[in-house]
Image (cartoon, rainbow, N blue to C red):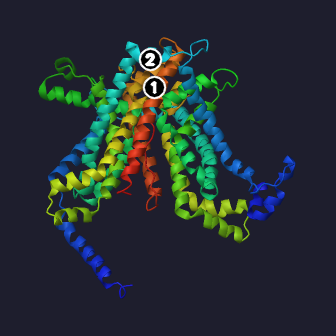
Amino acid sequence: MTVDRLSVQGSVVDAAPSGKKGGAPRARPPRSRLIDWLAVGPFFLFALLFIFLPSLQIFIRSFQDREGHFTFDNIVTAATGVDFVNAYQASLSISLITAVGGAAFGFLLAYAVIMGGLPRALRTFMMTFSGVASNFAGVPLAFAFIATMGTAGLITRLFEAITGLNPQRDLGFSIYTIWGLSIVYMYFQFPLMVLVMAPALDGLRREWREACENLGGRTYHFWRYVALPILLPSLLGTTILLFGNAFGAYATAYAFSGSFINLVPIVIGAQIKGDVLYNPGLGNALALGMIVIMALCMTGYGLLQRRSARWLR
Amino acid sequence: MRGDLPQIAGTADISRVARRLRRPSSRRASPWAWFWLALGMLYFFVPLVATLEFSMRAVRGRYTFVAFQHILSDPDFYRNFGFSLMWAVITMVISLLLVVPTAYWVHLRLRRLRPVVEFITLMPFVIPAVVLVFGYIRLYGSRPLVLTGSPVLLVAGYIVLSLPYMYRSVDAGLRAIDVRTLTEAAQSLGAGWPTILRQVIFPNLRVALLSGTFLTLAIVVGEFTFASLLVWPAFAPYMEDLGNKKAYEAAALALISFGLTWASIGIIQWLGRGAPGQTQVTGAH
């Protein structure tokens, strides 16, 4: 084992093949660079092959036509084609709805559990359940909601039995719409909010509230001038996280609605399967758009998270 | 201590007593707290109850567990679930082999690489799975390197998905144990690298490694995007396919899948109880 050499630092310098290059000995002898690369090399090689090259390649081909010449056509088509604009509009609106809705509901729930004075057992249960529910996405989640609010779902039938109205026929409500899919997405969105916000709410110190009360502040003042300013970066950051979470979701949307609702991931998936107008450059441009939006989201999340770390840890 | 700083110790005591006194009186549950909790519980449980009810309606006119029986006696169920488990185990092994030495070395000797490694492990949050598959098929679907048709791309995709969770678990474990001191102590006692890794580092990292692997298991077994788009037999595509053909069985399978998720999250939380640096638990959607 070459690795054994490291244990005695001095002998490594002697054994290092510095003579091969023929130059004078370096100012700082290479302290077993080889071993460093053996340890971290595979990881970086993997990242290069399976994360960066595929992304780079999407980026490059977004600007190439079929013959490989540079062009903006793909980007222009993706940005102006009715189908693609619609797909982006649908994806963005569903992400926005479920991010804001999930953040609001998740925050209230986290507040109820952490600060509402509920029994401690409920709090533990809620946190565990949030962990499970935020993972319960994809195909089974879609099925669960079809069984709940689909045409033969439990809620649908109960509603019909009680009011005598069929939600779809009489009220024009269908879950195979943006709003319906939003209700489905909320199932994994707000638990994620609970998971992230609970520690932040826990980090609000009792002393801050007491200080506010000593200065004559009431609950409103505490929230308006102390708690919300402290929590705001965390709140906004998590909302952005939820946005990205919904934006990238493929499995849930696919299993739920097939191709009823053309979200961007669904369109890209169709491009992969070769279902629709086969134009590789266009697919690349769509994928690039997704990466850009997700990257913006994650940058915003990172910046806000760093800011919230000032007060909360 | 107490004698040296009487005032400070006194203040601390008072605030502690005050805290204890205030807790029961000022912190009674508000009705709003109960309201939001009730709403959350409804959201959680109504779909599960509805799925159960739906899955039991396979026979007209009465409730039965026939759909569950069909699932559990379907050889395809075991075959696809077995495939998913196999992909999960392969993913876990390779992911561990990639992440553990890297995280260890970054802690021990290459500290300046830490932001880079962290950045890489967070990439799956930036590049959605469907985009990654798209990139794989475009890049490795033609010469010089053709990998479509071999499970390499599937496992690679799963490893990428597992990276944030695996790295965070291992990183939290390494932070908690002061690797450098332990390693140097072992070295000064004359231990070689194999001994250090096997007898010092691994036993201390066991919980972190286990929670990382269980998260990977939960993610890979339920993963749909890669398996479906790369056309490999797996649990989630099987479920999706079942949904198109047999509605009641699909509902039953969704419940079984929920139970599996619950079990693996339960195991992770049980493993990580009391451990510092809890990792956040979420998967791919």
Q: Secondary structure at mark 2?
A: helix
Q: Are marks 2 and 1 in contact (CB under 8 Å)?
A: yes
Q: Quadrant of residue A192?
A: top left
Whole-percent x, y for residue B283 in the image: 45, 41
Q: Quadrant of residue A51?
A: top right
Rendered image: mark on residue A91: none
Mark 2 chain: A
Q: Is residue A298 above or below residue A284?
A: below
Q: Is residue A235 above or below residue A60?
A: below
Whole-percent x, y for residue A145 in the image: 32, 31
Mark 1 chain: A
Q: Residue at x 63, y 46 (%)?
A: B98
Residue beneath disc 1? A289
Q: CA distance from mark 2 to mark 1?
A: 9 Å
Q: Quadrant of residue A136?
A: top left
Residue beneath disc 2? A78
Q: Amino acid at mark 2?
A: Ala
Q: Residue at x 56, y 30 (%)?
A: A55
Q: Quadrant of the N terminus of chain A?
A: bottom right
Q: Are marks 2 and 1 on the same chain?
A: yes
Of residue B202 and residue B182, the one placed in the foreground of this image is: B182
Q: Secondary structure at mark 1?
A: helix
